[in-house]
Amino acid sequence: MVRLEAGGLSNQPVVEVLLAAYNGERFLRDQIDSILTQDYANLRVLARDDGSSDGTVNILNEYAERFPERFRVMPPSPGTGSAKDNFLLLMQASTGNYISFSDQDDVWLPDKISRTMQAMHQLELKWEADTPLLVFTDLRVVDKELRPLHDSFWAYERIEPDRIDRLAFLLRRNVVTGCTAMLNRPLLEIARRMPKEAAMHDHWVALLASVTGKSSAVRTPTVLYRQHDQNVVGAKKSRSITEFIRRIFINDARIVQWEISQRQTRALLKIHRDELSTEDRRLLEAYLQCGTGNSRIVRIATLIRYGFYRTSTMENIATLVDLWRMKVPSADQP
């Protein structure tokens, strides 16, 4: 049973939690209850269903009836078919000065919002009021029954959160897990223009914070990151070196991911060119050159010069192979 504490609300800014749902009845109540029992009491939930065929809508409506001041469900609308676009509609409908993303199948630790807001406040003391700000945290990896699998998602996936300030790295690998993120209003206003070329909402937000604002990484886990058979994005066990080598020359999926990142970078440069520093514009243009240059040697040299590296040596070798394999435009192509 959820019990809500009302004390101290006047001294707390409101945090709006954006809950994206789709066929989530299996774990949804656990997540909502963990949100509504946060030790940071002054929060509200804005939820949207993306066309579920199970009991998700009934669960959302039940909470909206029980907690009308704190839980709101967006009116029914056609499904978008993706978590990214579901979150975009939530961002566009949000009225909060601070927002946090929520998946439907995790469980938040009780101090998630208060701990994140504390880091946000520290950023606000350092930067101007209109600075786009992002705070994100580590996670604890658990199975579907919430049994622990790993104490740190960052360690599990070899994520280095400080690399959010290294744009050359961030273009290729996201370090922000959306369900841990908190955005202030200036960053939300920019993020609401997220284009279809964005890979995922959290990667897009991370890029925006890197090039237009500031961020802070909280190294304490604040979320039980549930792994199950229906995860859209989740923790993935690393392949063995033998398997990686076996697949290094035949893995077309990597090239697909490279093309996705190229489209995302092109959109970032087009939409936010005027907000970028000269250095960042040049770096984005160089990254695009890696994928579109008419010389394999130039592509590889550009990658090395600007440091568009991945985490491991094997991943970087794979990247060099992929750049060599990618088609070079013919002389008569524009």
Image (cartoon, helix red, strand yellow):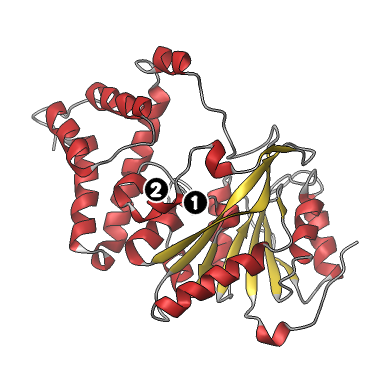
Name above or below for residue 326 compared with residue 86: above
Q: Position of residue 325 (x, y in %)?
A: 26, 21
The furthest residue to the bottom: 10
Q: Position of residue 121 (x, y in %)?
A: 53, 75
* Local secondary structure at mark 2: loop
62 on left or right of 197: right
The furthest residue to the left: 331
Q: Which residue is mark 2?
A: 197
Q: At 80% from the left edge and 52% from the top edge, which residue is drawn?
A: 30
Q: Which residue is mark 1?
A: 176
Mark 1: amino acid: Val
User: How many residues crowd mark 1 within 10 Å: few (<14), some (14–19), many (20+)?
Assistant: many
Q: Residue 51 bears which disc, if any? A: none
Looking at the image, which is closer to me, 46 or 107? Answer: 107
Q: Is residue 194 visible?
A: yes
Q: Position of residue 216 (x, y in %)?
A: 47, 62
**First reached walking from the N terminus: tag 2 or tag 1:** 1
Name above or below for residue 84 compared with residue 145: below
Q: Quadrant of the N terminus?
A: bottom right
Q: Is residue 50 visible?
A: no
* Local secondary structure at mark 1: loop
Q: Nearer the viewer, mark 2 or mark 1?
A: 1
Q: CA distance from mark 2 to mark 1?
A: 18 Å
Q: Quadrant of the C terminus?
A: top left
State the image quarter where residue 153 is shown.
top right
State the image quarter where residue 34 is shown.
bottom right
Mark 2: amino acid: Glu
Looking at the image, which is closer to me, 30 or 87? Answer: 30
